[in-house]
Image: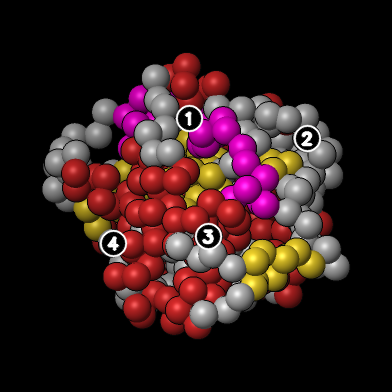
Amino acid sequence: MMEKNAKIYVAGHRGMVGSAIVRELERQGYINIIVRTHKELDLCDQAAVEKFFEQERPEYVFLAAAKVGGIAANNEALADFMYENMILEMNVIHSAWKSGCKKLEFLGSSCIYPRMAPQPMKESCLLTSELEKTNEAYALAKISGLKYCEFLNRQYGTDYISVMPTNLYGPNDNYHPRHSHVLPALIRRFHEAKTEGLTEVTCWGDGSPLREFLYVDDLADLCVFLMNNYSGNETVNAGTGKEITIKALTELVAKVIGYTGKINWDPSMPNGTPRKLLDVSKAESLGWKYKTELEDGIRLSYEDFLNNPMRAER
C-alpha cells in the first residue's frame, strides 16, 4: 500500500488520464504528488529524465504520458507515434528502476490486442495474432513498454505493473477537429452543428463498429486501486464490459447535446477495428467495478467541454 505521504510521480499530469489520476490521489488524501510540465521536463530527453529521477527519487510512478491521437493522426504519423512513445516510456521506466522506485504502473491501450482477437478480449490474447494496421505503430510502442516492465520484474525482481484501458473520455479530453478520438470528436461536431443551426451532420464509416467506453475518473480509481492491490507480470484490462455501436453512440451524443438534425454516414471513410470489447473479469475479481454509465459520462464531458473554451480550440 502507498503511504499517504509517499512521494508519487504522475507523468503526463496535464493529459486526460494523468490529470484524473492526480485528482483521484488528492481525493484519497495523498499529499506528496510531484509533476512536471513538458517544458520543465522533456520525457524524450534521456539525460534530463535520468537527472530528474536521481534528484527526486519518487517511490511510486504512474506513467500516463504518451503521444496520442485518433485514426487520422495515427495513420499520418506512424514513425512519430512509434518513436516518441517508445523513447518516452523507456526513459521513464528505466530511470525509475535505476533510482530504486518501489512500484511503477504503466498505462497502455486496448489497441495492443490483435485486430481479430476473440471477443471479449482477455489479457492473455496479447501477441497471439496481427495488430490493427491503422494504429500498429502506437500499439507496438505500448507493447514494448508493457513487456519492459514484465522483463524488469523477471530479471530484477521489481514490482512494475501495467493497465490496459479501453476507449476513454471525460474531463481534459482533446477535442481537436482532426486529431481527437471518436467520442470527443462527436461532442465537438454536434455542439458546432447545434450552434451553427446545421440541418444535417455526416459521420465517418457506416456506424457498425462496436466500441466500449470508460469514464476517465473510473480509470483513475482503478489505477490507484491496482497500485495498492495488484502485483503481477500480466496486464489488467480497464473497461466496463459493455459495448455500443458507433451509430448508437452518435445518436446518444446528439441527444445529450440537444442536436435534432439528420445524421448521415460516409462509408468511404475508415471504420477501424470492427469490435473492441475488453474482458474485465480480472479487475472485477480483484474487487473493482466501474461506476459511471455512458450517458451520465457524456453529460459530464459536455459540461467540461463547455467550461473549457480553450480546450475546444485545440
**Circle 2 sits on which residue?**
117
**Circle 1 sits on which residue?**
157
Q: Residue at x 39, y 45 (%)?
A: 296
- Compute the Cα span from label 1 to label 2: 31 Å
7 sits to left or right of 96:
left
Colour scheme of the picture: secondary structure
Sooner in the amino-acid sequence: mark 3 or mark 2? 2
Q: Dots 3 and 2: beta carbons under 8 Å?
A: no
234 sits to left or right of 304:
right
**Circle 4 sits on which residue?**
35
Q: Secondary structure at mark 4?
A: loop
The region drawn magenta spans 222-249
- Compute the Cα span from label 3 to label 4: 36 Å
Sooner in the amino-acid sequence: mark 1 or mark 4? 4
Tell which tag, 3 or 4, sits nearer the viewer.
3
Question: Tag 3: residue type?
Answer: Ala
Residue 251 position (above or below residue 25): below
Tell which tag, 3 or 2, sits nearer the viewer.
3
Sooner in the amino-acid sequence: mark 1 or mark 2? 2
Q: Secondary structure at mark 3?
A: helix
**Circle 3 sits on which residue?**
254
Q: Is residue 293 visible?
A: yes
For residue 281, what is the image quadrant?
top right
Question: Tag 1: residue type?
Answer: Gly
- Compute the Cα span from label 3 to label 1: 50 Å
Tell which tag, 1 or 4, sits nearer the viewer.
4
Residue 214 position (above or below residue 235): below
